[in-house]
Amino acid sequence: MASIVRLLAFGDVHGLQYLSLLRASLRSVPPEEPNAILMAGDVIDRGDVSGMGPVLREVTARFRDTPVVSVFGNDEYHEVEDRLIKEFGYVIWLNDSVAVLKLGEVTVGVVGSRGVLDKLTHWQRKNMPQLETVYRRRVGVLRRLLEEVSRVSDITVLLTHYAPTYLTVRGEPEKIYPYMGCKRLEDVLKEAKPDLAIHAHAHNATTTEAVVGLTKVYNVSLPARRGVTYVTATPRPRLIPTSGRS
């Protein structure tokens, strides 16, 4: 099977803040319609749900019938998740969960999550200290979901807001890397072997692509890239994931 899957990905629009950049970059994407659109969180700004509509209108005006998959970022506050899901029900929202998409002849499994931080931010430590436990457990959850979905998918994607490696946040101050993502997830990528890992959050990154094991990692932050990211993938022979815990 050699079918090419085309994915259009972006994050960190922050509602109206980078809407004009999104609009301009959508005009410049290749003429071939993507098979799916992946949004890597912080599509809205500081919990303002009204910012989602304008973003999605730009996307659907350009690609009307393309499925849209999204995860929540730190600006999609926990308390607005249900409202986003209700008001924008045509978006496939993933929150430590999986979507299996049949895109032509290819089955694409997307594991979606906010992701993991190695260190809680000051605000998180003060207001949501339980996230330390959530993040610790989430590493194992993402490993399990990736291993499970790889058994039924030709192409497997990890879609998160926070970075699953420090490699694609380079350009940010090194001291804040632990607040950008989780280096421990590199072992998950090496063991579960997803084809792609797509994230956002690092606005100032200058290194936006890397390879971890067999996984191509893309930072699709709109301000970092100065536009949307077009990713192509073809199915490769499935390798049986190893847990690394035997």
Image: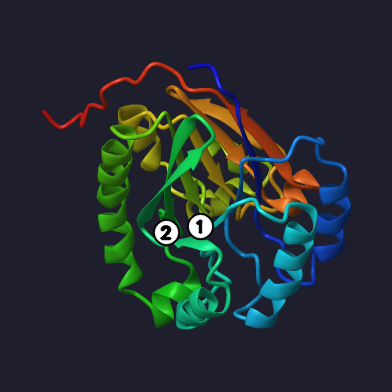
The answer to whether residue 229 is seen in the rendering is yes
Query: As shown in the figure, which amino acid type bears the numbered disc 1?
Result: Tyr
Give whichever of 180, 211 is nearer the camera.
211
| Residue 156, image x, y percentages | 43, 35
Q: Are marks 1 and 2 in contact (CB under 8 Å)?
A: yes
Relative to 21, is 34 above or below?
A: above
Drawn side of residue 132 relative to residue 19, left or right: left
Give whichever of 24, 177 is nearer the camera.
24
Give whichever of 237, 165 is nearer the camera.
237
Drawn side of residue 47 relative to residue 151, left or right: right
Dot 1 falls on a residue whose secondary structure is helix
Query: As shown in the figure, which amino acid type bears the numbered disc 2?
Result: Lys
Dot 2 falls on a residue whose secondary structure is loop
| Residue 188, image x, y percentages | 33, 37
Number of residues whose C-alpha sits closer than 10 Å to that of mark 2, classed few (under 14), some (14–19) or many (20 or more): some
The answer to whether residue 48 is seen in the rendering is no
| Residue 30, image x, y percentages | 81, 35
Which residue is disc 1 drawn over? Answer: 179
Which residue is disc 2 drawn over? Answer: 119
Please tell me how many numbered marks the rendered image carries.
Answer: 2
Color encoding of the figure = rainbow
Number of residues whose C-alpha sits closer than 10 Å to that of mark 1, classed few (under 14), some (14–19) or many (20 or more): some
Which residue is pictured at 81% across the width and 40% down the height? Answer: 29
